[in-house]
Image (cartoon, rainbow, N blue to C red):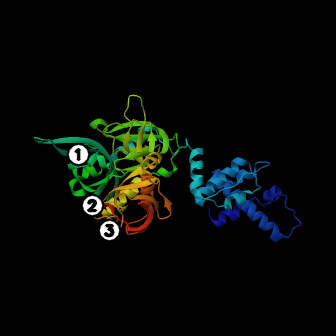
Amino acid sequence: MDEKTKDEFLEEHKEALFEEQNVDQSEPDLEKEEKLKDYGEELFVEETIINNSKPDEYIQKSNMKWTFGRVLALVLIAALAGGAGFGLGTNFSPKDVVQTSANYDSFAKTLRLSTAFNTDQMDAVSVAEKVSPSVVAITSTVEVQDFFRTMTTEGQGSGVIYKIEDNKILIVTNHHVIENAKEVVVEFSDGSSATAQLIGSDPETDIALISIDLTAVSEKSMSAIKPIEIGDSDVLLVGESVMAVGNALGYGRTVTTGVVSALNRELPLMNGKMKLVQTDAAINPGNSGGALVNSTGQLIGINTIKIADTKVEGIGFALPINEVLRIADQLDKDGYISRPYLGIYGKNIDDTLSNLYELPIGVVVMEIVEGSGASASDLQTGDVIIKFDDVKITNMDDLVKAVETKTVGDKVSLTVVRDDEKKVIDITLTEKNTN
């Protein structure tokens, strides 16, 4: 509404507003007008934005109070506009609530929880229809050699179209779907197919990025595909409805439904560890690299692994999309993931080994990788690493996490024990992918 409309609203309901506020008519006109403007604008905003009703309908209501529900409505409006928050147990006015500022991220989950069954959600059929044009089936051809011959095998997987730009279609999938593949063929939702090229792959996070030249796709097929809508895995809630879409068992697009069972499940993936989204939506062979979407059809994860055991049912995992996109964007830019590298293979010295061999608790250097930062330093096999800069090291996990906080080219100091003496050794971290 423009200012003229607000002025008209205030003028039309001046007397009713004065009465509502118990304004003393003997007060100076300027003071009365200021009270009228402040209070009247609050009512105008509430009625025209929150209740979506006509302003004059409000004046006809009797004994209007700022109930908790009305205050909460204003809080939600303010949060969406730029952050809002309030503390229980304190006195506040509606105006204070609207003007209060707090971290939106912490409020977002409360907002999502309170609107878990809002009208933005779609039924499963609508979600499947929305997502299907963005999910592809992947067939990878791999050559396997035994003692006598070279054999060709095919593997089935899935992928998700997340960008179409620069005359190419970008598809994110799992590293293990395309690992060692001589050829990767992508089948779109309309049944057409095209050969894909590998842009880059990251074994540690099990993420790969492949592309298809637009010239290899017909206009008819282009009209049947589209990039998927991206969600936010940082605001997921346990119990939230999700759907897995992928090329299960190579049968083509298959849809399964479930919920977010747990968040931040840390599991070993290929050569590293990652925090995953756990779901009970069925994830079968061929689903790897496919989409895990929320109830509005937004991509919130890439399906990657399930626990296959006769004692286990309904435990699958997806890579959170925020981390996937960070990796995919760097793969698109550089073709690989830049990570700092110390350049050693080590073994944990726990309490048992420490007592047995009279060694300090830490990580003993078993091997030094040639060409790494460690090989260019005074570090030796047999050294026990007990500190990385100022961080105490008790096992390999500690050491890996410490290295991950650095960048390529950083100089670090290792405190080691050698022949019962402590030494400090400076090492420059190198690029892992070049070793």
Judged left or right of residue 290, residue 187 is left
Judged left or right of residue 74, residue 394 is left
Identify the element where label 3 is drawn: loop
Where does label 3 land, which residue?
Answer: 376
Residue placed at 87% from the left, 67% from the top?
Answer: 27
Residue placed at 45% from the left, 49% from the top?
Answer: 354
Residues packed near mark 2 inside 10 Å, few (<14), some (14 to 19) or many (20 plus): few
Q: Amino acid at mark 2?
A: Asn
Single out the mark in the foreground, 1 or 3. 3
Q: Quadrant of residue 14?
A: bottom right
Relative depth, front residue between 132 and 406: 406
Q: Amino acid at mark 3?
A: Ala
Judged left or right of residue 353, residue 214 is left
Q: Can the viewer see residue 56? A: yes
Residue placed at 28% from the left, 65% from the top?
Answer: 371
Mark-to-mark CA distance, 3 and 2 = 44 Å
Of the 4 image quadrants, the one containing the N terminus is bottom right
Relative depth, front residue between 103 and 212: 103
- Image location (x, y in percent) of residue 10: 73, 62
Numbered tag placed on residue 140 in the rendering = 1
Compare marks 2 and 1 and give the one earlier in the sequence: 1
Mark-to-mark CA distance, 1 and 3 = 40 Å
The answer to whether the residues at label 2 and label 1 have Cβ atoms under 8 Å apart is no
Numbered tag placed on residue 90 in the rendering = none
